[in-house]
Amino acid sequence: MFPTPMLVYTIDRTLDGVLSAVFDAFSLHQQPEMLVGKGEPLPLFCDEVHEVETADDRARRVWAGLEKRVSKEAMKLLAVSFLSELPELNTPLFNYICKVFHQPEGARSIERNFSDPDVLSVTNIFRKVMHERLRMMQFVRFQKTKDGTYLGVVAPDHNVLPLVVAHFKDRFGDQPWLLYDAKRRYGFYYDQQEVVRITFQDEEQLPFDLANGKLNEEVLSEDDKLFQDLWRTYFKAICIRERMNPRKQLNDMPRRYWKYMTEKN
């Protein structure tokens, strides 16, 4: 008895790429075993490879079809989970979407069927991204420049910057700020009116250090130098050595966030 040939789809690591893969699968009447990013190693026993060409119109058709079949919460789950950038998401996300379209009209949505491994996998990754979003809102430390702009540098595990912009716009709506992702080399700038996505062509001219997020001395506000010193002093003063619990501190505030936090530098 011969094993079933393994079909693998390769995509360009975008959400539109996954949606285009769904379109191809239904058009070609195929069900690939895996979705793999282009350039990534193929599985050992791969027999056939189909290279998916990302097409905006096809992706939009699939997305529009999903909106008719699942709730707004499920649509958010699909979009947010992709911000995880985890390669292991591609296949369960693809399967999740295919299962939605395979369901007969009027059937109960699969979005709450956590006994389904693909639904559970996508949901768990969504929760990871949302947890990272919460930590970004808790751990961002802003520095004030001489021109009054506030800079916050972060390097989250997942691409959560788009998910926190509304929070900071609402909370700091009366001051200009730049929130920059040092890991992905882009950020969002708010000029007290609108938020725009920015990148820097020449990183050597950045007014801050990508390694630790610190503003260069020549652009750092004198007031902010004082406030940083005061914050460090306050942080040390409230520490009760007899009650120190390093394990709990690491659980609440993982070490990977420390390099951008004033009180830890």
Image: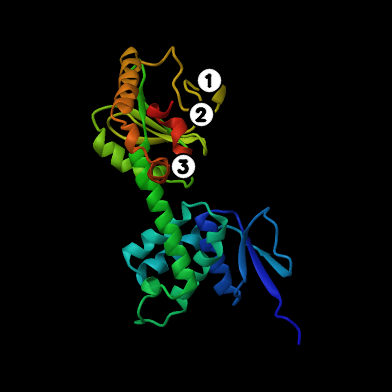
Q: Quadrant of the N terminus?
A: bottom right
Q: Nearer the viewer, residue 97 or 156?
A: 156
In space, the residues marked 1 and 2 are separated at their CA atoms by: 9 Å
Where does the C terminus fall, quadrant-wise? top left
- Disc on the earlier residue, 1 or 2: 2
How packed mark 2 is, by other alpha carbons closer than 10 Å (few <14, some 14-19, many 20 or more), is few
Whether residue 101 is visible here, answered yes or no, is yes
Q: Residue at x 34, y 12 (%)?
A: 222
Position of 114 relative to 38 (above/below): below
- Residue 40 in the image, given as x and y percentages of width and height: 67, 55
Examine the image and state in which quarter residue 172 appears. Answer: top left
The three-letter code of the residue at mark 3 reads: Pro
Secondary element under disc 1, as helix, strand or loop, is helix
Which numbered tag is attached to residue 156? 3
41 versus 164 height, above or below = below
Which label is found at residue 205? 1
**Contact between labelled residues 2 and 1, with CB atoms less than 8 Å apart:** yes
Q: Which residue is mark 2?
A: 200
* Residue 55 in the image, given as x and y percentages of width and height: 55, 58
Q: Amino acid at mark 1?
A: Gln
